[in-house]
Image (cartoon, grey):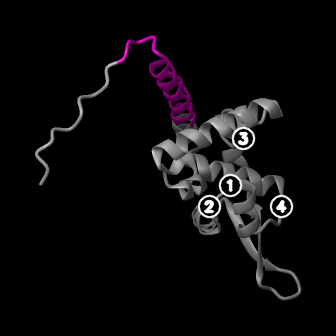
């Protein structure tokens, strides 16, 4: 056992750069949380399910593996999202193709009704906002966030988990 006391927390003035950036992260995360709450309230589904439903509607016949790629999530996460959408009657899954191994997904009328009730971008406000940034801004942001992630010693596999699942 160590008898050393933990270091005292660093107290910075409110206008110090770390405090200002922390506030910016809070603004971003709270905007995302607010959007997900609104989605759930208006659609009855979580944010990732709404996004999956919108991808399936835009690409009828897509499979779970391609859905995972389109959403940049793990295939097993995509399969779990699909399972929930099928169970609720929002998506139909049918074996198609010559070998009948591929499962094609299609949005059912109940799923289309859910999508009509969705406020704002179905993919979420953060992916939508990122999609509007120019390449140079995105590259700077990517590099700076990579530095922060390294300092956090964070598990990079968490990047494949939708924020609405956090």
| Front residue of 19 and 71 | 19
| Front residue of 112 and 120 | 120
Q: Residue at x 53, y 46 (%)?
A: 150
| Front residue of 107 and 29 | 29
Determine the CA span between mark 3 and mark 1: 14 Å
Q: Residue at x 66, y 46 (%)?
A: 114
| Numbered mark located on residue 118 in the image | none
Total numbered labels: 4
Q: Residue at x 60, y 61 (%)?
A: 81
Q: Residues within 10 Å of mark 4 (few under 14, many from 20)?
A: few
In which quadrant is the N terminus drawn? bottom left
Compared with 68, 136 (above or below) is above
Question: What segment carries the magenta color?
Answer: 12-35
| Numbered mark located on residue 60 in the image | 4
Nearer the camera: disc 2 or disc 1: 1
Circle nearer the N terminus (3, 1): 1
Determine the CA span between mark 4 and mark 1: 12 Å
| Numbered mark located on residue 116 in the image | 3
Compared with 98, 131 (above or below) is above
Tell me the residue that label 1 is attached to. 52
Determine the CA span between mark 4 and mark 2: 14 Å
| Numbered mark located on residue 85 in the image | 2
- Dot 4: element: loop
């Amino acid at each position: 056992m160590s008898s050393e006391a933990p270091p005292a927390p660093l107290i910075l003035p409110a206008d110090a750069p770390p405090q200002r950036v922390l506030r910016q992260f809070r603004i971003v995360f709270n905007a995302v949380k607010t959007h997900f709450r609104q989605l759930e309230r208006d659609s009855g589904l979580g944010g990732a399910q709404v996004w999956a439903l919108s991808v399936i509607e835009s690409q009828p016949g897509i499979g779970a593996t391609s859905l995972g790629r389109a959403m940049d999530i793990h295939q097993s996460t995509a399969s779990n999202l699909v399972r929930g959408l099928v169970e609720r009657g929002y998506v139909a899954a049918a074996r198609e193709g010559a070998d009948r191994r591929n499962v094609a997904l299609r949005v059912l009328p109940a799923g289309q009704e859910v999508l009509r009730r969705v406020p704002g971008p179905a993919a979420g406000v953060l992916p939508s906002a990122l999609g509007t940034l120019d390449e140079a801004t995105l590259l700077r942001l990517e590099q700076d966030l990579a530095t922060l992630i390294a300092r956090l010693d964070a598990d990079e596999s968490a990047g494949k988990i939708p924020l609405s699942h956090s």
